[in-house]
Image: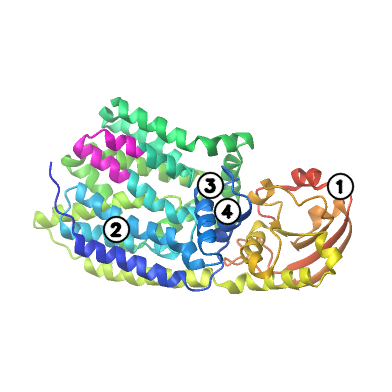
Amino acid sequence: MAVPRLATGPVALVAATVAVVHLVLAAVPRAWFDEDLMLAIGRHHLDWGAVDQPPLTPLLARLADTIAPGSQFVLALPAVLAAAGAVLLTALMARELGGDSRAQTLAALGQGTCVAAAQFGHWLTPYSLEPALWAGIFWLLLRWLRLRDDRLLLALGVLAGLTAQTRFQVMALALVVVTAIVLTGPRALLGRPAFWAGTAIALAIAAPTLLWQAANGWPQLAMAEVVSAENSLIYGSPLLVAGHGLAVTGPLTLGLAVCGLVALYREPRWRELRFLGVTFAILFAIVVITSGRHYYLLSLYSVLVALGAVALQHRREAGRRRAAWPVVALSVVLAVAGLASSVVLASPKFADPLVAATARAYHDLPPWQRERTAIGANPYVYAAYLDAAAPELELPAAASPNRAYGWFPPPPDSQDHLLLAGEPDQLRPWFTHLRALTTVHATTPLGTYGGLVPEATTIWLLSGRNTPWTEIWPALRGLALEP
């Protein structure tokens, strides 16, 4: 079955606009702690895995920092390409479904005006790369359903494996998609040898990070419980988390997704695609029950947006016209607001006081003491801030017992002093002297994060370490943010 011509001009215009806007914002000074963590892992601790991160995003951060050290513009390029790529792939999915030029353009706008995607499209984080990767997975699935070309299933396996090296949530997606296909079809997909060959390819690509997780006690599984507990403190109810996730999609994205879900069960021609609706329902229920992050399902919306755009085309062809452009205009306004909020959330004013105070305290130490002093921070957010600024301020890599940092190597035993940004109570038993140096106002850009992060931070100098770091570190490390 042939498909309509690609609406090259309008789709390229939407994708290019998204790319240009994010490139402009990429040049605005920022300090986003998730991006700083990727940079810290890439610079100092690159491995086959981390506590809650596969290695692909830190690897990209490492490459960007090697090509252009300290350039946040270059650091943002993979995220910007992913944001524009998700727009293009959403339009391509609409085309696979028979969408004409208007439907493809509307689908591109639906992805391009997603509020959350606008917010993080210029931060190099795993969740900024994931929408494009999931869109690629669904595009290959839709294309296989149309062409029955089994080479697409092998390509699907490669892409799924790479996606697993970005975020582990794609493994849940794969299991749920297979379950949905068993329940609703097309079951012929599961009988194709190429499908299982693609599955083997995906597992082979994901194997190194899975082995890292196994060797380190599967901390990613423990992180799910930590996330649930944090969301309970911040939101109070899993339903509020889910509501937040729906709100940050934007009216056009959400409206098209709802249209797509309804059309899956109204249009006989899409009977073979009903597994997509079942997939969304199961994943939505899982996120609500487990109280996952509000953005966990954002990457699933692209295929639903494409469905909705083509469903509106079918209504238009049947003579039931309804103007979508007022919703498009509102969505553009809200997406611009999302872009503006990203500048506020990632403003360096949240990190600068902490980093400056720590750097002053470190460089004020006598040279003999500085050589014997490690820099530490708790929570990990502060350690990420310090690591991002470390080369410019001539600071050593930061250490922390919190989150991913707790599984990184501890400071060398030659450093028996610790300059600590944060609460020292955990460390008191292992040091004979603690001295407060200065106190600064430094929280996360999200404030106190539901009371999980202090409103003010004291810089401490700890000396007289009485136990080797290799014994202290396993006793201290933990995943939960400490108040």
Closer to the chain start, of discs 4 and 2, is 4
Instruction: Answer whether residue 265 is magenta in the image.
Output: no
Picture coordinates of residue 211, whole percent (x, y): 56, 34
What range of the chain is rendered magenta? 138-156
Q: Quadrant of residue 12?
A: bottom left
Residue at numbered disc 3: 55
What residue is pinned by disc 2?
Answer: 255
**Residue at horizontal 39 percent and vertical 32 percent from the top:** 199
Q: Percent x, y for residue 333?
A: 34, 72
- Asked if the stretch drawn in magenta spans residue 152, the answer is yes
The residue at which mark 4 appears reads as 42
Is residue 244 depicted above or below 360 in this figure? above
Q: Nearer the viewer, residue 187 or 196?
A: 196
Q: Secondary structure at mark 4?
A: helix
Q: Is residue 371 above or below residue 135?
A: below
Q: What amino acid is found at the position of numbered circle 2 in the picture? A: Gly
Tell me if 312 is positioned left or right of 385 in this view: left
Rendered residue at 24%/52% (across/down): 92
Disc 1 from disc 3: Cα separation: 32 Å
